[in-house]
Image (cartoon, rainbow, N blue to C red):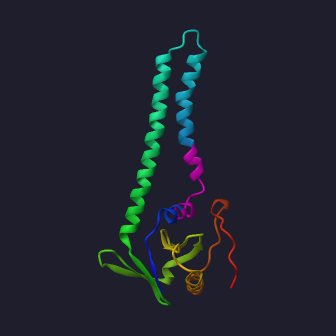
Amino acid sequence: MELNSKLSEADFREFNKMTRSKMYWFAELLAPFLILWFLWDPIVINLLSANPNWEGDGIAFAILVCGSLAYLLYRKQSFKQALAKVNARTQRVILNDEDLEWQGTNGAGGFLKWSRFQGWREGQQVILLEKNGAGFYVLPLTNSSEIERQSVRKLLQNHITYIPPRNKLTTFPARAKP
């Protein structure tokens, strides 16, 4: 069975959601909270003083707004760069009973035996194959029909164990058991 392995933005977002650590939201919300605390606290203290320094408050607020915008632009740009890097590696994937083969955009290729994978998880648009040790391999199924999806699931079930979603953030609709 042959699959196109180019990821769309939606596929890549789902892949990121499926591989997030448990501390993701804590770390994601901690940095803006600390920035607000250290910049906003002096502003409030200044407003409560008898002679407020409006220029200092304006500068602190401008730093807060500019820093937030720069952070958002950086995140969006790094997301696009990561997606381009992932899509530049592999063009198509061939699944068979012996292994997973891939062919790159420059003609290079390779294969991974099924024993190199410890499990697989299915999302709404992608299947995530977890390698032994560390790492993942993503199979996008966005353009695949339900028949193709069923045959991919059956092939993976024959060679790799299914891993249920790790937490409530990555739960997907239940699949029918074959």
**Up-down: is 77 above or below 48?**
below
* In the image, farthest residue toward the top: 50
Q: Residue at x 46, y 80 (%)?
A: 3
Residue located 59% across and 53% down the image: 23
Left or right, residue 157 beside residue 3: right
- Left or right placement of residue 104 versus residue 48 in this view: left
Image quadrant containing the C terminus = bottom right
Q: Is residue 113 left or right of residue 19?
A: left
Task: State the residue in front, 99 or 59.
Answer: 59
Image quadrant assignment for residue 90? bottom left
User: Is residue 24 part of the magenta span, yes or no?
Assistant: yes
The vertical placement of 21 against 163, above or below, is: above
Residue placed at 57% from the left, 53% from the top?
A: 24
Is 19 one of the magenta-colored residues? yes
* Towards the viewer: 126 or 130: 126
Magenta-highlighted residues: 14-29
> Where's residue 74, x and y in %?
42, 47
Q: Quadrant of residue 82?
A: bottom left
> Residue 84 location, x and y as percent?
38, 62
Extreme residue in the bottom direction: 97
Q: Position of residue 98 (x, y in %)?
A: 47, 89
Q: Number of marks in the image?
A: 0
Q: Nearer the viewer, residue 80 or 40?
A: 80
The rendered magenta stretch, by its main secondary structure, is classed as helix
Residue furthest to the left in view is 106
Query: Where residue 138 sits in the image (x, y, percent)?
Result: 49, 72
Q: Is residue 72 above or below residue 124?
A: above
